[in-house]
Image (tube, rainbow, N blue to C red):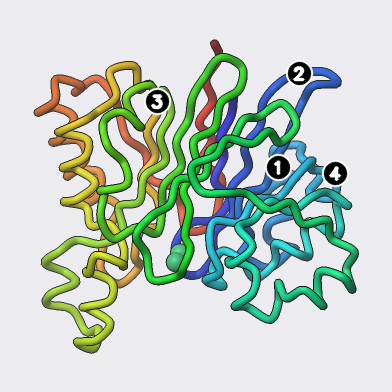
Amino acid sequence: MEVVTLASGSSGNCALIRAGSGLDRTTLVLDCGVALRTARDLALVLGVELGAVDGVLLSHHHSDHSAKVLAVAARARCPLWAHPQALTTHPSTSESERRRRKVDHRPFTSGQWFEAGSIRCLPVRLSHDAEPTHGFLFEADGVRAGFFTDLGTTDALPRELVEDLELLVLESNHDHGMLRDGRYPPHLKRRVGGDQGHLSNGQAAELLRDRCPPGLRALALAHLSERNNAPSLALEAAGQALRDAGRGELEPQVAPKRGILRLELAT
Ligand SMILES: [Zn+2]
Ligand SMILES: [Zn+2]
């Protein structure tokens, strides 16, 4: 299985999940909140035709994730897997838009596995200020991966859920001190730092320190704030947590705002 981030952060998110081989090969797009051309050009670097993917998944309605999901699904003539409530808020994913673009919506339910081609997916409900927001577990090729961004607490990620992960993409949005002392207005500081906001470097580190999956082999830190974080701070916090957990050999990576980060695991 391969998880590739093409864009990450509040100015747009898009990732690819790939698994299988030959006729069983499945490529899914997880969220698309960047210009279609940007996503297409980045996917092409990997040899992936965005117009030929097998499915699109939506995590939540915020436009940095949802803006172009319908456009991708329409172009690829593939299904869009989304929680029904995640489609009703944003005009770009409304029922009339879906009908106009002839997109086949496949609803999913929180906590229930579904199959998208050769990839099994489990939507995990997260605490975030877009109801509902989901992260995902993915299973394919004998590997289990987790993808969790846009969450204010790690309560939805107990040990039982994460213990078998071999690959993890985890939000590390802001440095607590930079957010506190920075220029955001008070209401935005409260929103970002609150239980329905975004995960801080410290919260991501705490999860890794407490419940780092023993079989974890690939780790990406994602959805970094441009204003309230620096890649070096996110890497330092996660690196220290991994050393504390006795996993100092595992090197976390940062998902760039635009550009490719490829995590690949063979069975
Ligand atoms: Zn976001
Ligand atoms: Zn969001």
Residues marked 3 and 2 touching at CB (< 8 Å): no
Mark 2 and mark 1 residues within 8 Å of each other at the beta carbon: no
Instruction: State the CA–CA distance, disc 3 to disc 4.
Output: 28 Å
Alpha-carbon neighbours of circle 1 within 10 Å: few (<14), some, or many (≥20)?
few
Q: Nearer the viewer, residue 245 or 256?
A: 245
Callout 3 crowding tier (Cα within 10 Å): few <14, some 14–19, many ≥20: many
Q: Is mark 1 within 8 Å of ligand 1?
A: no
Mark 3 vs mark 4: give the one in front. Answer: 3
Label 4, label 1: how far apart the Cα atoms are: 15 Å
Given the image, on which type of amino acid does mark 4 rest?
A: Ala
Q: CA distance from mark 3 to mark 2?
A: 21 Å
Question: Type of residue at label 1?
Answer: Val
Among the two numbered marks 3 and 4 on one chain, the one whose residue lies closer to the N terminus: 4
Q: Amino acid at mark 3?
A: Leu
- Badges 4 and 1: C-beta atoms under 8 Å apart? no
Mark 2 — residue? 21
Which residue is tagged 4?
Answer: 52
Does residue 210 appear to the left or right of 88 in the view shown? left
Say what secondary structure mark 4 lies in: helix
Callout in the foreground (4, 1): 4
Taking the image as shown, residue 24 lies to the left or right of residue 119, namely right
Question: Tag 3's secondary structure?
Answer: loop
Q: Which mark is residue 45?
A: 1
